[in-house]
Image: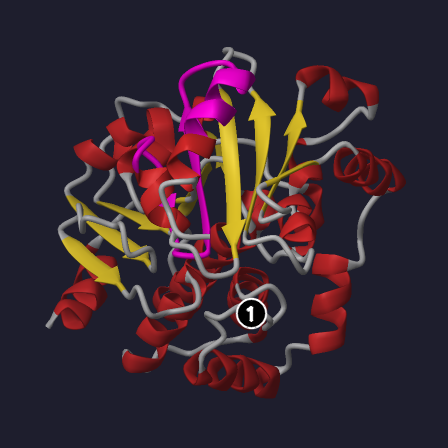
Amino acid sequence: MELTQLNSIIKSSKNILITSHINPDGDTLGAMCGMYSLIKTNFKKKCDMLLVSKFPKTYEFVPYIKEAKYCDEYDKSREYDLVINVDIAALDRICDAQILFKKAKATVNIDHHKTNIRYADLNFVEPEASSASEVVYSIAKNLNWKIDLNSAICIYTGILTDTGSFRFNNTTPRALLFASELVEIGVSPQEMYNLCYENRSKNMILFQSYCTNKATFLDDDKIAYTIVYKKDLEKFNAEDDFTEGLTEKLRAIVSTKVAFVAKEMSNGWTRISMRSKDVDIAEICKTFGGGGHKLASGCTIKCGVKDAIDKLLHEIRKRDL
């Protein structure tokens, strides 16, 4: 029923906005550009795409990404016929773009986070899916939309990156099946891997080595974390995406159960990126207003780095490590 409604709403909408979340990753960008491509191909309509914050240079290859504009470039008084949020578990993840979402005549929520409260008119939320991009592909298949190579590249990007190149526990049979179908369309797994994982700058590699070398290990090395101060970012002329994958490097240590990166924000708060092997860190992050997945979550703690780490460690140690 909702699928039929989605098809009808897209068909009748004269202006459509697709929104990605703050600090965009491969999944939100892949899902956003994938929906843009699918609508362009199947409905002959050109959507607007909104970025809340700067996207990593790694993803400059994603088809249509250069068509996206930043939030401050949009007229906030505009009323869209349809706004589609992709990979957005909660509305605060789109910051000032919330006003465009709330003013829209119709809203759609495409996501895979278990913490999603289904806040839109139409909600396609599949917590068992590997990624929002997988949900987008499922929608396209069920509606018999044509999926061209550009759409396939976008969607594959999201599935590839949110499964950690098909290594994480969200790599389900369906995710692999969908990936294989995208390869049949023409996606090159080798090229995609190279673009997503072997396209790093020298400064990024040196920055991550620096951060790893100053990591702290606690509780018989079951907890590992590193702090990224503003001065560290300045020292390496670091982009926002330089911390991407850093938490996974710490989690990869055999003794580590929970790993996190604490990043000092310009407003004095602390952004946390967490990963674990078996501890439900989504519940930990939820304590601070964040969330995500059981083994991969994040949050923002409204205090300085040292106090934030103390608060986070207190929550972590309540669990059985």
Colouring rule applied to residues: secondary structure
Q: Which residue is mark 1?
A: 156
Residue occupying image coordinates x 82% and y 26%: 236
Which residues make up the magenta segment?
287-312
Query: Does 191 appear above or below 198?
Result: below
Q: What kind of residue is marked 1?
A: Tyr
**Image quadrant assignment for residue 36:** bottom left
Q: Is residue 67 left or right of residue 87?
A: right
- What residue do we see at 80% from left, 24% from top? 237
Q: Residue furthest front?
A: 220
Left or right: residue 104 compared with residue 266 = left
Q: Position of residue 290 (x, y in %)?
A: 35, 37
| View extreme (top): residue | 267
Point out residue 23 in the picture as x, y percentages from the top left corner: 52, 36
Mark 1 Cα shell of 10 Å, populated few (<14), some (14-19), many (≥20)? many
Q: Is residue 130 magenta?
A: no
> For residue 314, what is the image quadrant?
top left
What residue lies at 26% left-to-right and 61% top-to-bottom?
Answer: 125
Q: Residue at x 36, y 68 (%)?
A: 135
The answer to whether residue 184 shows anywhere in this view is yes
* Place of residue 127 in the rendered image (x, y in percent of width and height, measured from the top left): 30, 64
In the drawing, does residue 202 fall left or right of residue 239?
right
* Residue farthest left in this picture: 1
Instruction: Look at the picture and state if 158 lies above or below 181.
Output: above
Res. 40 in view: no
Quadrant showing the N terminus: bottom left
Q: Secondary structure at mark 1?
A: helix
- Residue 101, position in %: x, y? 25, 36
Assess whether residue 304 is covered by the magenta stretch: yes
